[in-house]
């Protein structure tokens, strides 16, 4: 069973690894961005803390909460974004990891009204369709509800207007890959636009439809 492939110790190590890699790549800042993960089917979630330097977190800094936000284990406060994390787990039983980053290029293009386009194979197969969530103040129930509405249809990634991005997955590797692919696609789009191609060529629709049939999304 899937539960036998993971342990809470592995999850905690993976959260630390992902946070350090996101910080190294400039996708989160010193105090911005958060990550959570759970054992498959569990109602308990490990999440990064609030107000702690994100580039050098340690396993003891992490906080375990339930799906109501109650602290079960840990000494620090959970991320202020815990409401959107638990909302995702509540509406998506298939999701076991959530990465919330502040991808600068993806966020900037969204502010200009430009959403990720199917310009690369990765954009089609990995990202699929990426909804843009209207702005709501960070850490609020309003934002959590908006995220829940936009993610429950099966999206793998969201862009939070004026804020950042969310990637979800069966595990942390998948969620991390979603966030990194978002920025890669956005950088490619930006490069084409800087070179004068406002509307870059897209992957042909027939290939997009073939991908949907092959991978059932």
Image: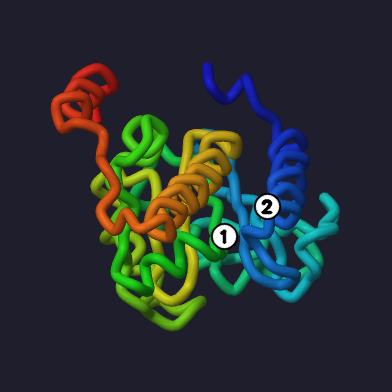
Q: Secondary structure at mark 2?
A: helix
Q: Nearer the viewer, residue 126 or 197?
A: 197
The answer to whether residue 89 of the structure is visible from this angle is no
Image height of 217 relative to 117, above or below: above
Within-10-Å neighbours for mark 2: few <14, some 14–19, many 20+: many
SS label for mark 1? strand
Counting from the top left corner in percent of width and height, residue 93 is at 39, 41
Residue in the image at 43% along x and 76% along y = 162
At label 1, counting other C-alpha atoms closer than 10 Å, the crowd grade (few under 14, some 14-19, many 20 or more) is many
143 on left or right of 100: left
- Residue drawn at x 14%, y 25% is 206
In the foreground, 23 or 89: 23
First in sequence: mark 2 vs mark 1: 2
x and y percent of residue 146 in the render? 31, 68
Seen in the picture, residue 98 relative to 150 is either above or below; the reply is above
Count up the numbered dots.
2
Q: Quadrant of residue 34?
A: bottom right
**From the viewer's perspective, is 193 left or right of 3?**
left
Left or right, residue 29 beside residue 164: right
The reply to whether dot 2 and dot 1 touch (C-beta < 8 Å) is yes
Circle 1 sits on which residue? 101
Residue under label 2, please give it.
Answer: 22
């Amino acid at each position: 069973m899937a539960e036998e492939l993971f342990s809470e110790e592995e999850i905690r190590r993976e959260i630390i690894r992902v946070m350090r890699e996101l910080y190294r790549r400039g996708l989160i800042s010193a105090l911005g961005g958060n990550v959570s993960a759970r054992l498959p089917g569990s109602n308990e979630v490990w999440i990064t803390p609030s107000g702690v330097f994100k580039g050098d977190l340690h396993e003891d800094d992490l906080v375990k909460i339930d799906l109501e936000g109650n602290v079960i284990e840990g000494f620090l406060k959970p991320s202020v974004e815990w409401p959107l994390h638990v909302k995702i787990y509540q509406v998506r039983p298939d999701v076991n990891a959530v990465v919330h980053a502040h991808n600068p290029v993806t966020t900037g293009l969204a502010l200009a009204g430009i959403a990720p386009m199917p310009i690369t194979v990765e954009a089609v197969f990995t990202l699929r369709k990426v909804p843009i969530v209207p702005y709501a103040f960070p850490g609020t129930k309003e934002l959590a509800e908006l995220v829940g509405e936009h993610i429950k249809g099966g999206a793998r990634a969201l862009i939070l207007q004026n804020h950042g991005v969310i990637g979800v997955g069966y595990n942390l590797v998948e969620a991390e890959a979603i966030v990194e692919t978002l920025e890669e696609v956005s950088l490619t789009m930006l490069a084409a636009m800087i070179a004068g191609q406002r509307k870059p060529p897209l992957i042909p629709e027939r290939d997009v439809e073939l991908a949907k049939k092959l991978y059932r999304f």
